Amino acid sequence: MSKQLPAKRTKQLRAVGYWTGRFGRRFVRHFLLWIALAFALFPVLWIFSASINPTSSLNTQQFIPDRITWDHYRSLFTDPTYPFVTWLLNTLKVAGITAVGTVILCALSGYSFSRFHFRGRRVGLLAMLLVQMFPQMLAMVALFLLLRSIGDIVPALGLNTHLGLVMVYLGGAMGFNTWLVKGYFDTVPRSLEESAMVDGATPFQAFWRIMLPLVRPILAVILMIQFMTSYAEYILASILLRGTDQYTLAVGMRFFTEQAFNRRWGPFAAGAIVGGVTFLFLFLPFQRLIVSGLTQGAVKE
Amino acid sequence: MQSQSPFAILIKVVLLGAIDAVAVWAGIELVLSANYSMLAVLVVGTGLLNALVLSKKAYPFRYMAPALVFLFGMVVYPILYTGYVSLTNLQTGNLLPKHMVIETFENRFVLAEDAEQFTYSAFVDEGDGMALVLESETTGERLLYENGDTGPLDMDDPRLTLDDEGTVTGLLGYEPANKYAISSRLDALSIPFGDYVLRHSLFKFSKNTKQYSFDESSDTLTDLTTGAVYSPIEGTFTSEDGTELEPGFQAWIGFRNFGVLFSNAALRKDFGRVFAWTIVWSLFSVFLSFSLGLGLALLLNDRKLRARVIYRTLLIVPYVMPVFISALVWRGMFNTQFGIINRLFNDLFGVTFRWLDTPMLARGVLIFINVWLSFPYMMLISLGALQSIPGQLYEAARVDGAGMFRRFSKVTLPLLMISLAPLLIGSFAFAFNNFTLIYLVTAGRPAVLGAASPAGATDILISWTYRIAFQGGSGNQLGLASAVSILIFVMIGTMSAIGFRFTKRLEEVYK
């Protein structure tokens, strides 16, 4: 080097280099991520703290409680003013039936769209895609009136029944999931079922014994996504379910906030943790599948 | 196709026969109850079912029939039905069909001019039977009413027990009844009496006359007491001088609901405000959560970063909480009096805010909460997209002397946008209809003074629809709500079309 920088200038540069250099940049990066973590996790930690705080009121809650109590959790199962357990079971029932029903119906319809050639196949597929663009919940008034009149004839499927709600959810799930299954079936070679049929299987046996096991991954994804969607669905459930004992968790949790939110904060927090953790446990095993499904949509090869 | 075993065919035929038998029975019931729309559904449904099972050509449809039934019944039909309802006046006060409303009017009575009254003794048997001995206070004429039949009382009837004054005290086969206990049954009676009917009130029967008579040929309702003639105008019987009768009935009113949204000044103002906030809300939610998500994705997009997986896992926690729970948690935290946010503000700066009761603050809070809810999704899709950008592009840019910011704005962002734009349009549409969050945090409040409809400061179109339909102070305006639904359908359809074109254009770029 022909020209020497003055000592002071070198020092300055070094100082800058500390922050912009490899170590500094790493430090800034971790620092920003920690702020993001605080933002993302604070409400979760706060609500968990509320659920084990001896006080059940909003304004006296401390972030780190003096002592830990499980009373709020106990009250969820014992306090007759909020049938929390009923709500949770209702939710699992509605979401469970919807998820299983969706998988079965969409496996069938996806298979037929993928394998059979019939008139109206293209039109049918396009129509399904088109219908799926319009969110079902926008037809809330019509669904309300429809279930009311179905209930006049078959009370078990009318307003305020879980089966009625399941029917509505099933309808909303058909279009999109049929497409998903159809796409997956398209990747399975045709020769597999052809050889099964040569061996004497009926078309349905070929579908049931050979094809269905092969598309299990996509069926698992649909099962989970549909379970979670129904678990968290609010608007239709709140319109169609009218009695406290029929509520799903999403509709029922509002009860805590309706009156005396301040005093019911503790039990509410416990309920939120139970509801959230149940959801999380169902989600975790499938996280990889769902996330990769998400990113598959994002990445174009 | 493999031929089926005789056994399978037998089962098929028996099952189908059983279903058809039930359908025939149900069909007869429906004909008897004059429920023709349901009958049509039944006939078409059973016909299709038979075709599915019996026709070989319909084989593929056997697989998709169940899915199609739900898709049509619970999505396609409701959407079409929404369109129909939007063209009617269906609302509180106009809920019943016309023939039922006419029936209601024909069952309205007014006291006859002479106001003749009858005292009575009542008798009941063990079942539903009821008998009344009625005696006119004016003429002393006595009547026997027995299970729907009325006639003059035959004093020689051997079943009667009379006391010394000639009052009937017993009737063989019946027990004397407590008038209080059967008052609701008595109130429901209309006992024909010549041109009049006898109606129960205050422990007497009084002579009543029909108030209205409906004339089918002229489609008018005549008030027999005043002579006023009411004709049906848009679901309400209206006289010439404009008097309206309640209740009205369901009627087709064309595009009136849409017209009112744009022509009624107060309603137009509500609509405008709600629409503007819906757009602002969706735009800001998507823009801010995408910015944050992308920022974090850039921070995480370094394979050498320590604890990268842990950061990523923890950062998606908001995304895996059900929205109905996080929305309520945030609502508690933003509570003005007790919430932690105000406690922090008070401790740090000595000020507190009425977060959810001030229009602008409530809107800000909602966007803030939505950013919290959706940045993890944005982060995940950005990470996926970032990893697909080839590293050579950056090297080339670096060789060309592009700095960090130039590399980001000229290489990263355009490439990201190609794959993410359709997803962002999808997120926009989702925020546009994010009822759960808005409704659970503010329920559309704070209320706006002078609003013509239940439209609060934070109501988006869909929550406004919900409140018009199910929560209005002036009753349930289902027709108007459906009209708003249809408008949202149109907007969403337009958005999807734009999204589609975008995707298509991008695909062309890739070819």
Image (spheres, coloured by chain):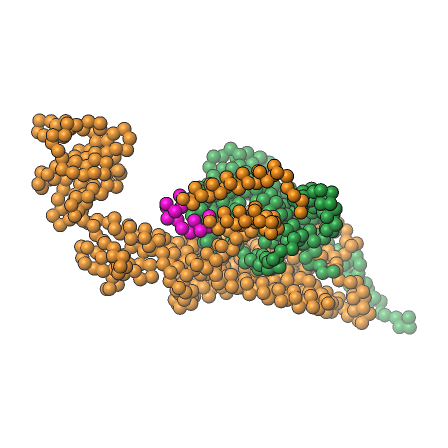
Chain colours: A green, B orange
Between A237 and A81, the residue placed more toward the observer is A237
**Magenta span: chief secondary structure:** helix
Image point (37%, 46%), residue name: B33
**Any part of residue B323 in sight:** no
Q: Position of residue B195 (x, y in %)?
A: 16, 48
Q: Is residue B97 magenta?
A: no
In which quadrant is the C terminus of chain B drawn? bottom right
Check the image and name the residue furthest to the right: A2
The segment highlighted magenta reads B29-42
Residue B497 percent coordinates (x, y)? 58, 65
Q: Is residue B38 magenta?
A: yes
Q: Name the residue: 91% across, 70% down.
A: A1
Q: Give the image location of residue A77, x and y in percent.
A: 53, 34
Residue at 18% x, 49% y: name it: B209
Task: Name the one closer to the observer, A209 or B443.
Answer: A209
Q: How many marks?
A: 0
Q: In the picture provided, is B246 more to the left or to the right than B435?
A: left
Question: Residue at horizontal 68%, vertical 67%?
Answer: B506
Q: Is residue B121 visible?
A: yes
Height in image: B297 above or below A66?
below
Residue B386: quarter of image = bottom right
Which of the two residues, A256 or B205, is positioned nearer the viewer here? B205
How far across and down, in percent of the image, does residue B239 sit?
25, 61
* Residue A121, placed above or below residue A56: below
Question: Is A251 left, or right, of B95 in this rendering?
Answer: right
